[in-house]
Amino acid sequence: MTSPSPAARLIAEAAKSREVEAWISRQILAGQRPSEILAEMDRLGTSKTRLSDGPAGLTLACLVMFSLPFLALGFILPA
């Protein structure tokens, strides 16, 4: 008996809950390969996947931190 393909495993994991499905979708959009996603899921545990968004979460955090000084200066020093 052969083991299921990475795509089949991802589909099975995504069917468990909406949070896991959304997390997997974000990882795919961030450019991670299915084998990388499965390795991270094995490392974190399926229930903990929503705690770490990997590259997608890091990108969002960087964007927020980059724009924060500009927003603050816009309110402190109005034109």
Image: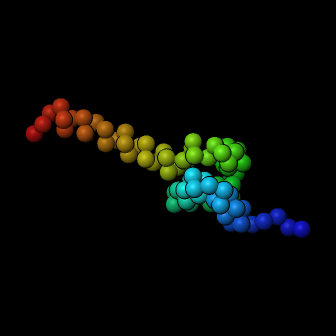
Please state, as top left, top right, bottom left or bottom right, where the N terminus lies in the image: bottom right
Examine the rendered structure and indicate whether residue 27 appears above or below residue 45: below
Against 32, residue 7 (above or below) is below
Residue ranking furthest to the right? 1
**Number of callouts in the render?**
0
Residue 11: horizontal and vertical position, in percent?
Answer: 67, 64
Instruction: Using the image as rendered, state which of residue 24 and residue 37 is in the foreground.
Output: 24
In the depicted structure, whether residue 73 falls above or below residue 59: above
Q: Which colour scheme is used?
A: rainbow
Q: Is 25 displayed left or right of 34 in the figure?
A: left
Name the quadrant of the C terminus. top left
Any part of residue 41 in sight: yes
Q: Is residue 58 left or right of residue 51?
A: left
Who's the residue at 31% across and 38% down the image?
A: 68
Dividing the picture into quadrants, the one containing residue 16 is bottom right
Q: Position of residue 77 (x, y in %)?
A: 15, 33
Q: Which residue lies furthest to the front in this view?
A: 17
Which residue appears at 25% of the width and 39% of the height? 71
Q: Is residue 24 visible to the viewer in this orientation of the structure?
A: no
For image coordinates 57% across by 52% down, the residue present is 19
Task: Answer left or right for 1 relative to 58.
Answer: right
Question: Percent from the top left, x then y, of residue 28?
Answer: 56, 60
Residue 9 as seen in the image, left or right of residue 30: right
